[in-house]
Image: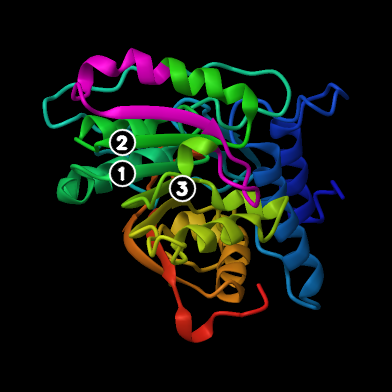
Amino acid sequence: PTSHDDPAGCACAALARHFLPARRNRHRRRRAGMPARHALLVAATLVSESSCIANVAAPLRVADVRCDAVTGVWTLQLPDGVSGDGLPTAGPPTAGPLLPSLPSGAVLDLEQRRLEGDGNVGYRLWRSAGAMCRWMRRNEGAVRGARVLELGAGTGAVGIFAAALGAREVVLTDGEAGLLPLLASNARRNRPLLSHDTEVTAGRWRFGDDPPACARAGAFDLVLGTDITYSVNTERDALCGTLRRLLEIGPDNSRAARCLIAHEHRRADMFDVEAVLANEPAAAWDARDVCLGTFLASAREHGLRVAPLVTEAGRRVQRAPGVVEMTTDLTVFEVSRDELHADPTL
């Protein structure tokens, strides 16, 4: 529905107009910004909430939304008559550099190469990669000398950042074969920032499949992933099945020591005018995040425990009357085995 009498339908239509291409080629599924499946997840949530609550007025939604593909900053056009005057208008920029610098002051040199076909999600940096790299900067001792695996690596930013912090071996993996040359290229571009004895390799690994040869030689000290939770939208249990396998004790009595995932929250009320103007933190780290809720349910079924480590709050700033810039919350959480509640049939 697209009638202005249906705010959820309006939000859905706005998302579809921005994120879905006009071409019918099924492989060209997104424009610059959030992947189409992510946008439709939010839109579907809005429609579901609107249709399931009887006799209650639907919340007022923003009139138009845009997302900057480079910075990840949302620009929200408020409805007519809503100014956003209660929001801050000054202070630091809504979004800074996506990745922090290394202890030496150097920054990674990363190519972000647009791909044809189904590799269009992983070719660029996402804000969650910055959150994971900042966690590693604060916890360099956990990275130095470690054997590191990055899942859904995309550009390889997180794994290469770990290598530059002193990891002894980094294995970059992604399910899209078309991204493997990009991973190899970015590893070469940043070789001067790495120790001479640090090894970086890349291989294809789709969640739920057997690991590639480069990821089979013993256990990992750190398994890292950023914005990989959205895979539950297409294959609900593949990611948690892979995480469980990595965290299980193998034939050589080894398993991954730690598994960390960075997630960008796209909550069901992120385009709710009342929530935008209230500018308050979420009631809980996992509140109203449908995609995260699906991942958490799958994790429980696979005998996995999920614990948040740090949440970076998003910001809302009024940039002009009726125009708000917004970034969403980012959380780094740890996944571990929950032996007590593990399902032996999985």
Drawn side of residue 330 relative to residue 239, left or right: left
Q: Residues within 10 Å of mark 3 (few under 14, many from 20)?
A: many
Residue 212 appears in the rendering: yes
Residue matched to label 3: 84
Q: Quadrant of residue 300?
A: bottom right
Q: Position of residue 321 (x, y in %)?
A: 47, 37
Q: Is residue 69 above or below residue 34?
A: above
Residue matched to label 2: 169
Q: Is residue 149 above or below residue 233?
A: above
Residue 74 appears in the rendering: no
* Residue drawn at point x = 26 percent, y = 48 percent: 135
Mark 3 element type: loop
Give the CA separation, mark 2 to mark 3: 49 Å
Q: Position of residue 324 (x, y in %)?
A: 47, 40
Q: Please give the range of residues in magenta.
A: 186-212
Colour approach in the figure: rainbow
Task: Tell me the kind of residue under disc 3.
Answer: Gly
> Which disc, if any, is residue 147?
1
> Which disc, if any, is residue 290?
none
